[in-house]
Amino acid sequence: MRTEDLRLLILKTFKEKEFYGYDIQKKLISEGSNIDIGRLYIVLNQMLREGFLESTWEKSDKGPKKKLYKIVAKGRQELNKIQLTAVQTIHKAYGEYLLNLPPEKSVFNIISKEIIDQGKGKRVVLVTESSSAMYERLLRSIQDRLDDSRIFIIKPKKVSLKLELDNIVNLDGNLENIPLKDNYADLLLTTNMPRNENVKKATREWQRVVKKTGKIAVLAPNVLFASIQDPLTIGDYMERWEHETYENRKVGEGDILLKSLRERFSNVKEKNIVHMKLILADNPQKTSNDK
């Protein structure tokens, strides 16, 4: 076994657990591999020096003291980096799969039909905090349903989003600050969820910008809603791990957003599309909860 593979095995197997050197040897033997105990301790000592592990001496009822190992923050970060690379590789392949589906199977066409009716001269607002190749395909699908439409993209100044589409207006803003007039948009679409502490401010801003006859559409991962249950599909597992580890998101946050939307709109619907949840809200109602 290569040293790199042995180090990874140690990180993956024990994570939060304390362990002895011989625990690793037992694990290897159970999987049909073997390794010289001397080489094993050389690798453990190397990981100790590099800060991936820490160790303490434990008294033994019989015989000499035993060294107890534990993976620390740097080791967990290293494991997360390895897992993130794997997740990103699968995400990229899955994204290419979605982008290459025929029109009748296109997720983007399914979403656009759900969120906006065919028409002329409509104003569409996309609020996003990130860039993605998926946005161009989704917006193109929306434009195909509309004549003489204009799309406003609201994003932080630091986010670069280059789209080869006509009638696009880029404006600096975010989920809680949209630089457009009251009752302006026929559709407000967002691919990001506000943080819990900003949910009320965000939904108030969305209600302000959208027309009385307009619609709010939110696309968010299924795993951020409490209705998701174990055992997870492999896709939901990857989504949950990524959002919890790198965005500090938790299962159930989506339900806080749903509650706030239901306070402001009398018609709120949910629909699952692949690994995403599409939330649609319309028919705004008066609310005294505007603080």
Image (spheres, rainbow, N blue to C red):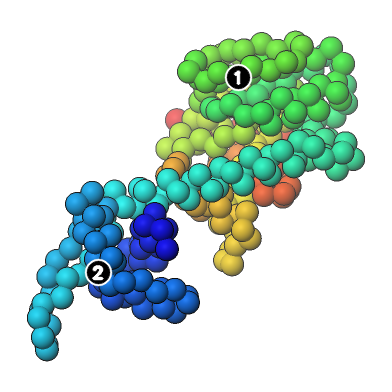
The quadrant in which residue 278 appears is top right
Q: Amino acid at mark 2?
A: Gly
The residue drawn where x is 44% and y is 73% is 33
Q: Is residue 49 above or below residue 106?
A: below
The quadrant in which residue 54 appears is bottom left
Question: Which residue position holds label 2?
Answer: 38
Depth check: give the residue in front, 270 or 154: 154
The residue drawn where x is 25% and y is 69% is 38
Q: Position of residue 220 (x, y in %)?
A: 61, 42
Depth check: give the residue in front, 240 or 73: 73
Question: Which residue position holds label 1?
Answer: 161
Q: Is residue 136 visible?
A: yes
Q: Amino acid at mark 1?
A: Leu
Q: Disc 2 to disc 1, how far (Cα)?
A: 54 Å
Q: Residues within 10 Å of mark 2 (few under 14, many from 20)?
A: few
Q: Earlier in the sequence, mark 2 or mark 1?
A: 2
Q: Is residue 133 left or right of residue 22?
A: right
Q: Position of residue 201 (x, y in %)?
A: 49, 30
Q: Is residue 78 left or right of residue 45?
A: right
SS under mark 2: helix
Q: Is residue 8 visible?
A: no
Q: Is residue 38 above or below residue 156?
A: below
Q: Residues within 10 Å of mark 1 (few under 14, many from 20)?
A: some
Q: Position of residue 88 (x, y in %)?
A: 56, 42
Which of discs 2 and 1 lies nearer the camera? The answer is: 2
The residue drawn where x is 39% and y is 54% is 4
Question: Quick one: quadrant of the C terminus?
Answer: top left
